[in-house]
Each structure stands twice: as C-alpha cells, then as structure tokens.
Image: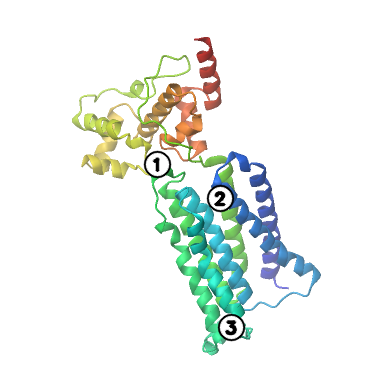
Amino acid sequence: MSIYEKLANLILNFTACTFLVSLIFLWLRRRQGDRARYFLIFTCLYGTLSFFVPITLSYTAAPMPVSVLCAYNLIGGLFYLILFHLYPIEVISPGWLTPKRTVMLFMPWVLLVVAWIALPMTIRELHSFGEIIQYIGEPNVWFRVLILLTILPYNIMIFVVPHNWMRSSVSNRWIYFYSTVIICIGIVYDIFTLTGLIIVLPVHLTLFLIFCILIVYQELFIRIPVPAGNQPRAVATIPEWTPVLNIFSQKQKGTKNHPVWIELNKIMTNDALWRDPNLTQDSLSAKLCISRSSLATVIRESGFSGYKEYLNRCRIEDALKIINSDRTVSIYQAFFTVGYRSRRTAKQYFQEYVGCTPAEYMNWLEKSRNEV
C-alpha cells in the first residue's frame, strides 16, 4: 500500500467519523432549526453510510482495485450530489423546493438507473483514461460518460434558484462560496473518476471534510432561520432605557448639512436599505451616483470609522426598535429582519454598540415591561 493510499484511508476514516458526529449534533438540535436542517441531516446520514461502507469492506474483504469510470461510484456520486443540493436550495429560497420540484430534481438520476437496469450491458472494467478513449464506442462506456456529464449541470444549479434577500437566510457571498466549493469538489472528483490517480483521492476527501465541517458549523451556530410570518416594516420609537445608547445619532457630527450625507440618510431611511444583506459600499455609492472613496470620506467626516460601522449601527438601532415595539418578536427574528444572516456577527455588533449581550438586554427589557 502506497503512502497516498494510507493517507486516503486515514482521511476516509476521519471523514466518516466527522459525518457521524455532525449527524448526531444536527439530530439533537433538529427542533431549533427549520426544514433546511432536516435536509442537511439526510445529507449527513447518506454521507455517513457511504463512507462507512467502504471502510467496513476494507476490513472484511479483499481491497478492490482502483478503476476509472466505476458505474457504482458514478450512480452513487450523482445521487449524493443531488441530495447535497437540497440544503442550499432550501436556505436560499425557503419553500421553493416543493414535492414536484424535488421529483424533477431526482428524475435524471432515476431515468439513468432505470436505463442501466433495463438495458443489457456488460460493464467493462477500465483502469486508465486511455482505455476510456479506446473503448468509448461501447454502450457501457459512453453510458458511464453520460452519467458523468449529467453531474455538470447540477454544479451550477444553485445560481438558477430564485433568491429574495427578504425571504432568504443566506447572502450572495454564501451562495458564491457554496457553489465554488461544490464545483471544486466536482472537478477533483471528475479527475479521479477519469484517471484513477490515487494522489487525487486524498485531495477530494480533504475538500469534502473541510466543507462538511464549515457547513455544519454554520448551520448550528451562525445561520439565522427565516422567521415565520412577515415582520412589520413600521417600527416604534425607542424609549429611554438604561443599557441602550442612541446607537446611530450619537456618532453623528460635523457634516450633518452635507448634501451627500443628507441624501445618504434619506435613501437609507426611506427604503431601509440596511435590511438588504447584500448591500455593499459599491452598490450604495452607485445609488448616490458618487465614487466609493467620496462616500467613505463623507461617512468618516460624519463621525463614523467607515461604511461598516455606519451600516451596523443602522441595523442595530433598527433591531432595537423592532424588539421594543413587539414583544412577540425574538431577538434573532429582529436580527434577520434588519439584514443579518450570521448570529455571531449580529451578537458581536449588538454587544459593542448596546453594551450588553442580546440575552442580557432581553432579560432587562422583560423586567422593565413587568414593572410598568
């Protein structure tokens, strides 16, 4: 056994254990999430089984030689790829994945499996890319190439799912990251499937392992689920509370009468632009028809350290207004409404600007309401 085979086996064992632990944590906290978490649970369950099966076989049977365009790996890989897309589709557009669309999503895989079973084909075992070219005219070979090509459209499928930031629990940056990693994993998988190079297998497994850890961590500790129902757009004025500073106006100074500053606050207030999680300094400066540097200068001259502080102070003040105008709204529902898609980021800025944690503030607020 070569060093690459030993490394691949080590990573395979570690990946299987990681999927199993992720599955357990997701299952234990399944009621704290939404439908997307259940999709991720199914994905981790299938991943756990698909990784533990070859591990078990390696201890109970003779090792199988590495072959290219393995039909079983292609069918299983296509199924897992489709299953792996259920979670991002649900977090990008909750409710879009109806039973009908789910069936359509799996239909190519079903048709390929039925064709594989129905057609009388003898699967030729291939061991190099040269043998694929040599026997490409045989139905069993080009059929497997067809399965491999079917994988390609799924790699870009996330980009065609409708994304409405007001009803989505992820930002454009998350969508690009998820899609890029999926494409990279797919490319490495295709290289290994076509060439059988054992050196590629540890790379594929490592990418898969890191991606699994990042996505499960993001689901358990960062992502804010879409709140049920619509949150009110109009909010009440904040009363005077001991732990709360005037989040936004306390920083203003110097350029209150600057035309750009007046126009900036006008469009931000009228359209509540800070509630868009995809709002950037470039898009905001484009709305004002000024350069990025000019916008940054006006914001700094108005007492803020930069665009990031200005945006987050707008969001935190809006969140305070929401949770104080409606006691049925949770702090994380308010964070979602004002544009946050990360619990960690929202808590960080809340504590920085308000002076206490969200939990401490909610306890204080409830106590103040009871005293009235």
Kind of residue at badge 2: Ile
Outermost front residue: 100
Q: Residue at x 41, y 15 (%)?
A: 239
In what element is the residue under mark 3?
Answer: loop
What residue does disc 3 label?
Answer: 119
Establish if 342 lies above or below 20: above
In what element is the residue under mark 2?
Answer: helix
Q: Residue at x 51, y 59 (%)?
A: 102
Q: Nearer the viewer, mark 2 or mark 1?
A: 1
What whole-number distance in Å separates the C-alpha atoms at marks 1 and 3?
48 Å
What x and y, as percent, mark residue 343?
A: 51, 37
Residue 184 visible in the shown view: no
Quadrant of the image occupied by residue 289: top left
- Tag shown at residue 166: 1
Establish if 215 lies above or below 202: above
Counting other residues with Cα less than 10 Å from the Cα at mark 3, is it few (<14), some (14-19), or many (20 or more)?
A: few
Q: In this view of the protein, which residue sits in the foreground, 167 or 257? A: 167
Quadrant of the image occupied by residue 48: bottom right
Left or right of 71, for residue 3? right
Sequence-wise, which precedes: disc 3 or disc 2?
A: 3
Left or right of 286, for residue 105? right
What x and y, as percent, mark residue 1?
A: 73, 73
Sequence-wise, which precedes: disc 1 or disc 3?
A: 3
What residue does disc 2 label?
Answer: 215
Q: Residue at x 64, y 41 (%)?
A: 29
What whole-number distance in Å separates the C-alpha atoms at marks 2 and 1?
22 Å
